[in-house]
Image (cartoon, rainbow, N blue to C red):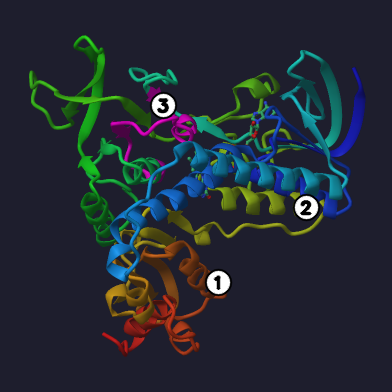
């Protein structure tokens, strides 16, 4: 048992934790970071953002080769899927990026410790290695960045054979014949897109009225229509109420009931060979010993913090997916920087009004700031400037004209209040609007900025023009 003393010990080496560790070290603090996973990077690098985007990109290329190459003069009739190579490519990318984080730890003099951490007191942490070896660390401050794990449904428990979480759906060894996805949020739609493009029949079962409940209707409708055209089937207002096995092959059979069903109405039977439960993620705090120390947790399991990320114990801080707010890697990273700067005596902050969110389907959806339904609900006096990609030259050249840019502005001041982009590369395009909003800019600021031609960004300029004056090309 070794007792080591640090200024900061970070629990969890995901985007929140590793960024906090690096920034704290850059600010001159002595830092250790602990993760129960042997590779740093957390969910994002190992089981989330990076592997899913690897598969989305590879599967999109496969889809394009099959469906679009011919019309632009490329004969790709011999295209075949090599799923194991696609998975090797994904694992290689993960390995390179996690090695990169390990290198950054070394470069910044951060001690990376593999093991499961538990808080013993306001300053003491016990770390149990996989071989059972226990060591203790002592720190002036502890940052919990323990993340979240997939949420299981009681009647559809993950079994790794037929009922899967997103983690397993990133590594299927063969393409399912019929993949049912329970939950129409971004993770379900992204993973559904991957397996649909690779040849699966994909059905999304959503409890609510719509998929992507937070998006504006016009934005969501473009995506849903596109996914339906690609072959994805949607069953909204439906609940999976049970599961049985059918026939001599013991085929999986889900009982799917209309949420507005009258009493006695029988559920629809949906047969499939794989189910992905993508109904959300829950904070991963059970093993940390928080309750014994009196650290408050809210009713949904999130660690309660004040505006400086301090828990109910002043020397213990929490950031990322284990506290409230959007469960996104960039939100966790920005909180990592903020908490480290606060610990170093600086003024770390995060602007929670301007956290972009991207759905990496095809088309992509990217949003920042307020949605139109937010503004309506708040009774704001706003203007809408919209511009379709079908009128954008660059979108035509790449054969990707689905969608539009929608900019929402204050009707009196012209200040940009929000933006939604549905279309190709929306995730990249949204940064321009986010930056303008961060500086309190107006639609006219965007519209009078010279945009390179021909680019997709010109659709943002035209939407801004439409918000305060008139677009040129529509
Ligand atoms: C399929 C999928 C796709 C996603 N795609 C995107 C995307 O495109 N963009 C985006 O912004 N976000 C995406 N996310 C969400 C993103 O991965 C998370 O928001 C992000 O990883 C949260 O970072 P974090 O540091 O808070 O936690 P995590 O990344 O979850 O890291 C927490 C770490 O803490 C460790 N840990 C937990 N408990 C202990 C303990 N007791 N002792 C030691 N270690 C512990 C865990 O092993 C883990 O490594 C996706 C998630 C999934 C599942």
Marks 3/2 in contact by CB < 8 Å: the verdict is no
Which numbered circle lies on residue 23? 2
Closer to the chain start, of discs 1 and 2, is 2
Which residue is tagged 1?
A: 435
Closer to the chain start, of discs 1 and 3, is 3
Q: Residue at x 67, y 29 (%)?
A: 37
Residue 359 as seen in the image, left or right of residue 257: right
Pick whichever, 393 or 107, lies toward us: 393
Regarding mark 1 in the picture, which secondary structure is present there?
A: helix
Residue 64 x, y percent position in the rendering: 35, 57
Q: Which segment did they paint magenta?
A: 163-187
Q: Residue at x 59, y 39 (%)?
A: 91
Q: Quadrant of residue 68?
A: bottom left
- Which image quarter is the N terminus in? top right
Which numbered circle lies on residue 164? 3
Using the numbered discs, state the Cα–Cα distance from disc 1 to disc 2 in whole angstroms. Answer: 22 Å
Mark 3 or 2: in front is: 3
Instruction: Please tell me how crowded label 1 is: few (under 14), some (14-19), or many (20+) other residues with Cα within 10 Å.
Output: few
Which numbered circle lies on residue 170? none
Q: Residue at x 35, y 81 (%)?
A: 393
Regarding mark 2 in the picture, which secondary structure is present there?
A: helix
Residue 17 as seen in the image, left or right of residue 152: right
Marks 1/2 in contact by CB < 8 Å: the verdict is no
Closer to the chain start, of discs 3 and 2, is 2
Using the numbered discs, state the Cα–Cα distance from disc 1 to disc 3 in whole angstroms. Answer: 38 Å
Instruction: Please tell me how crowded label 3 is: few (under 14), some (14-19), or many (20+) other residues with Cα within 10 Å.
Output: many
Marks 1/3 in contact by CB < 8 Å: the verdict is no
> From this viewpoint, is residue 344 visible?
yes
Instruction: Please tell me how crowded label 2 is: few (under 14), some (14-19), or many (20+) other residues with Cα within 10 Å.
Output: many
On screen, residue 253 above or below 308: above
On screen, residue 220 above or below 2: below
Residue 98 x, y percent position in the rendering: 69, 43
């Amino acid at each position: 048992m070794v007792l080591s003393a640090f200024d900061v010990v970070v629990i969890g080496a995901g985007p929140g934790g590793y960024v906090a560790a690096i920034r704290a070290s850059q600010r001159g603090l002595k830092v250790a970071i602990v993760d129960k996973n042997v590779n740093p990077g957390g969910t994002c690098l190992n089981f989330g953002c990076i592997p899913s985007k690897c598969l989305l990109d590879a599967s999109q290329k496969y889809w394009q080769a099959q469906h679009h190459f011919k019309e632009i003069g490329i004969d790709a009739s011999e295209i075949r899927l090599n799923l194991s190579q696609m998975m090797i490519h994904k694992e290689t990318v993960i390995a390179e990026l996690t090695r990169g984080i390990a290198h950054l730890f070394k470069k910044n003099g951060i001690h990376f410790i593999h093991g499961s951490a538990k808080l013993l007191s306001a300053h003491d942490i016990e770390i149990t290695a996989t071989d059972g070896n226990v060591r203790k660390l002592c720190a002036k401050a502890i940052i919990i960045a323990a993340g979240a794990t997939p949420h299981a449904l009681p009647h559809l428990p993950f079994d790794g054979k037929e009922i899967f979480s997103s983690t397993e759906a990133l590594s299927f060894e063969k393409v399912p014949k019929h993949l049912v996805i329970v939950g129409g949020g971004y993770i379900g739609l992204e993973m559904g897109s991957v397996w649909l493009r690779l040849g699966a029949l994909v059905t999304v079962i959503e409890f609510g009225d719509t998929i992507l409940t937070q998006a504006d209707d016009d934005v969501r409708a473009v995506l849903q229509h596109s996914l339906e055209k690609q072959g994805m089937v949607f069953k909204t207002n439906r609940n999976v109420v049970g599961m049985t096995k059918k026939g001599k092959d013991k085929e999986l059979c889900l009982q799917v009931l209309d949420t507005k069903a009258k009493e006695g109405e029988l559920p629809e039977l949906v047969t499939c060979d794989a189910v992905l439960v993508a109904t959300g993620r829950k904070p991963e705090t059970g093993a940390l010993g928080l309750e014994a120390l009196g650290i408050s947790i809210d009713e949904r399991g999130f660690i309660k913090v004040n505006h400086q990320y301090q828990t109910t114990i002043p020397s213990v801080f929490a950031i990322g997916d284990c506290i409230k707010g959007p469960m996104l890697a960039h939100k966790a990273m920005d909180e990592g920087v903020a908490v480290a700067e606060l610990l170093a005596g600086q003024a770390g902050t995060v602007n929670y009004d301007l956290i972009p969110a991207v759905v990496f389907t095809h088309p992509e959806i990217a949003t920042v700031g307020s949605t139109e339904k937010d503004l309506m609900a708040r009774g704001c006096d706003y203007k809408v400037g919209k511009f379709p990609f079908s009128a954008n030259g660059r979108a035509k050249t790449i054969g990707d004209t689905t969608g539009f840019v929608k900019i929402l502005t204050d009707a009196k001041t012209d200040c940009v209040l929000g933006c939604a982009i549905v279309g190709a590369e929306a995730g990249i395009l949204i940064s321009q609007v986010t930056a303008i909003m961060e500086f309190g800019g107006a639609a006219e600021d965007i519209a009078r900025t010279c945009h390179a031609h021909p680019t997709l960004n010109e659709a943002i300029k035209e939407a801004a023009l439409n918000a305060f004056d008139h677009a040129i090309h529509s």
